[in-house]
Amino acid sequence: MAASLLDQLMSSLRCLPGVGAKSAQRMAYHLLERDREGGRRLAAVMAKAIQQIGHCQRCRTLSEQELCQICSSKKRDSQLICVVETPSELAVIENSIDYRGHYFVLGGRLSPIDGIGPRELGLDLLAARLEEGEIEEVILATNATVEGEMTARYIHDMAEARGIKTTRIAQGVPMGGELEYIDGATLAHAFAGRSNF
C-alpha cells in the first residue's frame, strides 16, 4: 500500500538537516492547517531554485549565472583567494567581515574513506586558477577537523609548489567547529589573526 500524501510530505521534509520525524510532522501540519498559501509559495520557489541554481564556473559557489556576483565583480581583489568548504561558509564570511578578495568553494573536504578525493573537490580547477599567476595569497578557511586540516595541507602544498603564500585563518574557531555556526565577531577575529600555514 502506497504511503498517504501526508506521509509523503512529512517524509520529504525530513531531507532537511536537523529535521526529524516530529519536526517534519509539525511543519506539514502547520502548512496544511495554517499557511497553505505559504506552502504554495515555498513549493514554487523550491522547484524554481532547484531547476535554476547551479554552481559558479569559477569559484563553485551557488549561482543562477555562469559567474556569481563575486567572481564577476571588478571591485574584488584578484590577488586574494579564500578557500572554504561550502557556499554557506562563503556567505558567513561575506556577511561578517570586510573581506574583498575572491573565493573557491570545495563542496566538502578530503575524505578517502568516503571516496572524496582532489577531483571531487575541484582541486584541478583551483590548480588552474593558481597557474594563472594573478593570485598572491591563498587563505585557508577550511574547518578545524581532521579532514579539514588534511584538505588545508593538500592545498597549502599546491600553492607552495607555485610559490604562492598560504595563510590559515586563526584558530579562534573551535576544533571540530563548523564555520556556518560561528558568530561574526569570532570569525572576524579569526580572519584578522590568520597566520602563515
Image: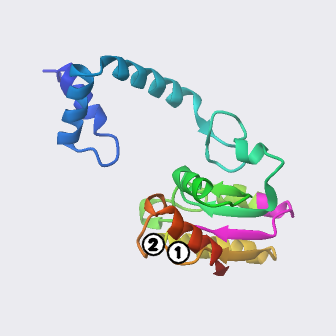
Residue on which the image places disc 2 = 145
Residue at image point 24% right, 21% down: 32
Amino acid identity at mark 2? Thr
Specify the segment rendered in magenta. Answer: 129-142
Residue at image point 58% right, 53% down: 95
Give neighbour class at mark 1: few <14, some 14-19, many 20+ (Cα, 10 Å): some
User: Is there any visible trace of residue 142 in the rendered image?
Assistant: no
Q: Is residue 178 left or right of residue 54?
A: left
The image quarter containing residue 193 is bottom right
Q: Looking at the picture, how far across and down is residue 10, in whole percent?
A: 23, 31
Tell me whether circle 1 and circle 2 mark residues in contact (CB < 8 Å). Answer: yes
User: Is there any visible trace of residue 36 in the rendered image?
Assistant: yes
Of all residues, the one furthest to the bottom in this rendering is 196
In this view, 185 is above or below 105: below
Of all residues, the one furthest to the right in this rendering is 133
Q: Quadrant of the C terminus?
A: bottom right
The image quarter containing residue 23 is top left
Q: Looking at the picture, how far across and down is residue 35, in whole percent?
A: 29, 21
**Is disc 1 placed on a helix, strand or loop?**
helix
Give neighbour class at mark 2: few <14, some 14-19, many 20+ (Cα, 10 Å): some
Q: Quadrant of the N terminus?
A: top left
**Is disc 2 placed on a helix, strand or loop?**
loop
The image quarter containing residue 190 is bottom right
Q: Looking at the picture, how far across and down is residue 62, in whole percent?
A: 59, 42
Residue 79 in the magenta stretch? The answer is no
Q: Looking at the picture, how far across and down is residue 72, in whole percent?
A: 78, 43
In this view, 121 is above or below 147: above
Residue at image point 50% right, 76% down: 172
Amino acid identity at mark 1? Glu
Residue on which the image places disc 1 = 149
Of all residues, the one furthest to the left in this rendering is 1
In this view, 74 is above or below 13: below
